[in-house]
Amino acid sequence: MTEYYGSKLEDIFNSMEDRFRPEGAEGVDAIFCYDIAGEDGGKWQVSVKDKELRVEKVEGNLKGCSVTIITDPETFIGVTLGKIDAGEAFSSGKIKVDGDIGLLTNILPKLFTKYTPPAKDVTSKDIIDTVVERFRADKAEGIDIVIGYDITGEGGGKWSVIVKDGYCSVKEGLDPNCTVTMQMDAKVFVGLNLGLIDGTAAFTSGKVKIEGDMGAAALSAGMFERFKVGVIEGAEELISLKCLPSIDQRFATGPVMGKWFDGLKEKKFYATKCPVCGRTQIPPREICALCRVRCTDFVELGPKGTVTLIDDVYYASPDPLTGEVRETPYAGVYIVLDGASEEEAFAHEIKKEDIDRIKPGMRVRPVWAEKRVGSYKDLLYFEIDE
Amino acid sequence: MANKKKNRNVAIIGIGQTEYSSHKEHQNQAEMVNEAVRRALDDARITMDDVDCVMHGNMELFEMVYQPDLWHEIGTGAYGKEEIRITTGGTTGASLVCAADNLVASGMYDVILAVGLEKLQEGHTTGGITNMADPLWFRHLQTGALTGTTAQEMIEEFGEDRAKRAAMKYRIMMDKHACLNPRAHRRFGLEYDQMDDLMNTSPKLVGELRLIHMCSQSDGACVMVFASEEKAKKLCKHHPPVWIRDHITVHREETLPNLFGFKKPEMTQRYAARKLFERNGIKDPVEYFDVFEMYDPSAWWGLDWLREFLLLKGDEHIKMLEEGEFDLDGKLPVNPSGGVTATNPIGATAMLRPAEAALQIRGDAGEHQLERNVRHALASGFGGTFWTVLIMLEKDLNW
Amino acid sequence: MKRVAICAVAQHKNESDIWYKRFQGMLLDILEEIQTKTGMDFSEQRGVRSVVSCSDDVFDARTISDNGVTDVLGAHYREEEKIAQEGLNAVGYAMSIILSGHEDLVYLAGHCKESQPESRNMCTNLGYDPFYGRPIGLDFTNVAALQAREYMHKSGIGDEHLADVVVRARQWASRNPYANATELVEKGEVMASPMLCDPIRRLHAYPVSDGAVGMLLASEERAREFTDTPVWITGFANCMDSYFLGDRDLSSNFALKKAAANAFRRAGIKDPKKAIDLVEIMDAYAYQQPMWLEGLGLCDEGQGARFIEENGPATYNVNLSGGMLAGNPIMLGGLYRAAEAVLQLKREAGEHQAADVKRALAHGTTGGAGQFHTVLVLEI
């Protein structure tokens, strides 16, 4: 299998089990299918049900997919690692999606922790070699301990870290005076130091064995800065701030929009009528922009009307303050209400059940909220008038 | 509208752009602005000491900064200078160019540096655009600048297959242009043989407006330096000045649905073009102009508006597209820069149009430079509820 | 250079909460008033083809705040450009459209409703960078307090002087039909009013205000078609100071001095004390009246206290409208000043009319503690 950005497809799928977050899978019942084209591609099926995960490589056809992601290995790995912008890959057709797209945007990100490429370049020795420079003298005041590391398996070794009088040194082999000795596999040691493995879990599950003073083991964690691959590469972490500025508003309606909202209470559409050209405006305006003359006459329009154009919306914008997103698809319709000037359409939504049938030229009628208070919520939607 | 002779001629003498991308975490807003300012000053071979007045424009609610010119001062170089801030929505960048033309021609200032910018990553763009709707009524219905009505109308007029193909051809053509522009944000490398595939598989946003048709959300800044004729002739030693011949702005009322009734009003695009060409004695814009940098927020709108801007009839614009007349070697190349579907830092987007057009006239556009001798250029801005700005640029003082 | 005239002005009465009207309705009142006064129309041949507006997206809570008002600006199928800074700058820009030769008439109108957002300080807090300025809570009021402290120390101004400024402002405001805070106050009342942001007391600060202003500008050739008493713009300039408060000498008036010098040079003024008959200052806070007057050179440097004690404000006809202290929305503080100066020059100021005014100055400022200043010189 070809590597892209230092990872193979297998690395990503094989690590899914470790990265799975059952708490994010509450109530999820879906099958995510991956159809990754090309010689070095493959097909995978990731099923999530009742907080259980199953990842399988599939030969032949993918079946029962809730959503299928169709792409190539380079794009898939690039997007997974954040090297390729997902939105752009999606826009340009490098990633195609079949099925329930909402599962990808809303559910998938909650199911797994972020994938990081295998830390094959980092060895136990790399970590031990940086111990002295990562040592924080300010946290080690008055501490006098020797920590033994017994790292087994490939790339393993034995080291002792000596902390005394605010100084730190390392020597090969296990010192006979070790305050505490920690034994673990090299993979676990690297994983712990890279933050890929949770320390408590590793200890609880027996992956790390501790002999001697347990308190000293806990103490040792605070005396060193975290090992970072980035430090080796010389990269710096950039900070970005997240905040949601929001200022409550109180909008005046004035006599013109006030009349409009009053009308909604009574299930009536009030439009202004221009005293010069006769144009009706809905919702009403203070002025006729064409004649530049104040409008004070109101006329009642509709309530039925004729559809001119339809906008089937598959992408709803989230409310920038609440983050709420409307359910899609929905359809906006442009309607010339009975009695309106022919250029003056009114825009609103059509009933969900009518989306598939609605066509320009059709007659529609408004559907009102049962309790109307003079707000935009009074008018629910329009429906086909049959 | 009557056109009076300008008090004095105004030239574009410097242009600076950042690279455009969806992410600019390595810079804050003021730093991003500063990068473009330095490049524009270098391009004009001047320093801030030569600048009399700084102009600034972007949309406050996209980044949620109140009067951001106050903070950005540390990047724009406005300290101790005069400053004018103008914002008009999507047209902002073009409005800044028109205003700079006015301010220099008036004799009030000799050299102006104008900054258009947006850092869309720092807010929610579609949400920000939706905020333009009246909070009392339309805000609960609008979805940013996304609408499928133009696609629907074009399908009705030209047939489904022809209309969809034309829109996709336009989109792929823009991508091909963008691929030649190293600053462009989105460069996909699309090929014409992907047309059928993209027409059916690119995710739908609204009706037949698909994700691939729509403009990007970009971070970036564009800066232009303007000078009076006298100053321009003194300062422009390294490249020729580009002259602003005329400009026109046409806004329309807030209400949008009244564009979609049984009778359609004349589009501001056609109205503006008609008035501008009339008063400048241009009978055939396709013949006259050597390049058109158009604010095309989507492939459908771009294609539709070509008919309006170029005062074409029926399917003339579609035919021209099909016959390659808008390609780089066509009769009237459109958006050699890749246009707005490739790059869209909103407060800068409408400034990029005359900036890129001016680079074409100078012959400095780089890889996307047209091979012909570009003498007459047209640039457009779009914003608000179908507002239009048109700017005419010339290589020579020929009017 | 040719001259540009302001033919007519219209002001909406400033109120703390115009809850009964949308800003569209306020602007329509203004449009109708200007049309009635001048007979201007929007015909393509001889009418207004260019409109300059002034408003702010954050205060309006609308992206593209001018979009909601295109129709009530008369700008449908016309040119319209929005100045997104304090409205006095819109006058300068509108003048350039005419001087450039592009147009010979410009209609200018601005609006702002400070009552709409929950708090105007929350709006101006957004004027600071999100990394440092916002989290420590900077807004235009508390930044002004920092400046007030420094300036008061420099010029010897105390609480009593500030009370004098407010008492006088209210006396004049009570004669101005467009002013918001018109109730007379006693010196003791001012000095007992609660601290808003030490040393700024509640009565030292302009009240929350809603308002709108309109103007018709015309070329020298056409001004008299619309008025018998054109007022000429003879000087305009503005200037930006640095953003970081730590970079600034807060009591130095750096930006105002530079803006004033440029405006005076353009207007051919050598000694402002002799040349200016009337001044309208954007004094959002009481300390700013003497401080900005120092910046303009009408009060000697560091002599603010003596200036007030010796009745300097009366000598120079300062803020006969009541000034910003009587309440204007922040986006229009300077534009209202210009409108009042025009009324004075046209001898239409009614009960607060000054005698023998031939040259007046209007001032506006934007940004915390006067980061940006604008100066306009008007003459008959």
Image: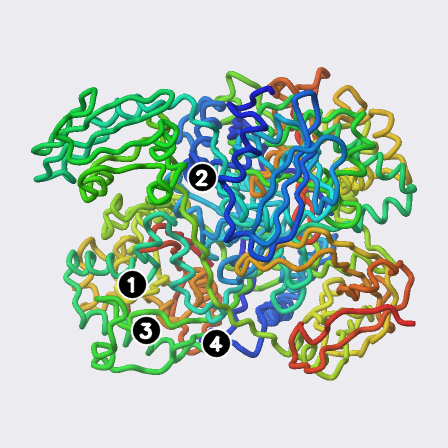
Q: CA distance from mark 3 to mark 1?
A: 10 Å
Determine which residue is flagged by label 1.
C289
Circles 2 and 3 on the same chain? no
Q: Are marks 3 and 1 on the same chain?
A: yes
Crowding around mark 3 (Cα neighbors within 10 Å: few <14, some 14 to 19, many 20+) is: many
SS at badge 2: strand
Tell me if I can see residue B241 in this picture: yes
Chain under label 4?
C
Amino acid type shown at disc 2: Cys
Contact between labelled residues 1 and 4, with CB atoms less than 8 Å apart: no
Identify the residue under disc 2. B53
Quick one: C279 or A248, which is closer to the camera? Answer: A248
Residue C249 versus residue C344 in the image, above or below: above
Of labels 3 and 4, earlier in sequence is 4
The residue that mark 4 highlights is C17
Select label 3 or label 4 by which is in front.
4
Number of residues whose C-alpha sits closer than 10 Å to that of mark 4, classed few (under 14), some (14–19) or many (20 or more)? some
* Tally of marks: 4
Q: Are marks 3 and 1 in contact (CB under 8 Å)?
A: yes
Disc number at residue C169? 3
Q: Amino acid at mark 1?
A: Gln
Residue B67 placement, left or right of B399: left
Chain at tag 3? C
Identify the image quadrant of residue A77. Answer: top right
- Going by the numbered disc 4, the residue's amino acid type is Asp
Specify the subunit that label 2 lies on: B
User: Which amino acid type is marked by label 3?
Assistant: Ala
Q: Are marks 2 and 4 on the same chain?
A: no
Q: Secondary structure at mark 4?
A: loop
Residue that appears at 64% across and 49% down: A103
Would residue B353 be visible to someone looking at this image? no
**Residue B316 numbered tag:** none
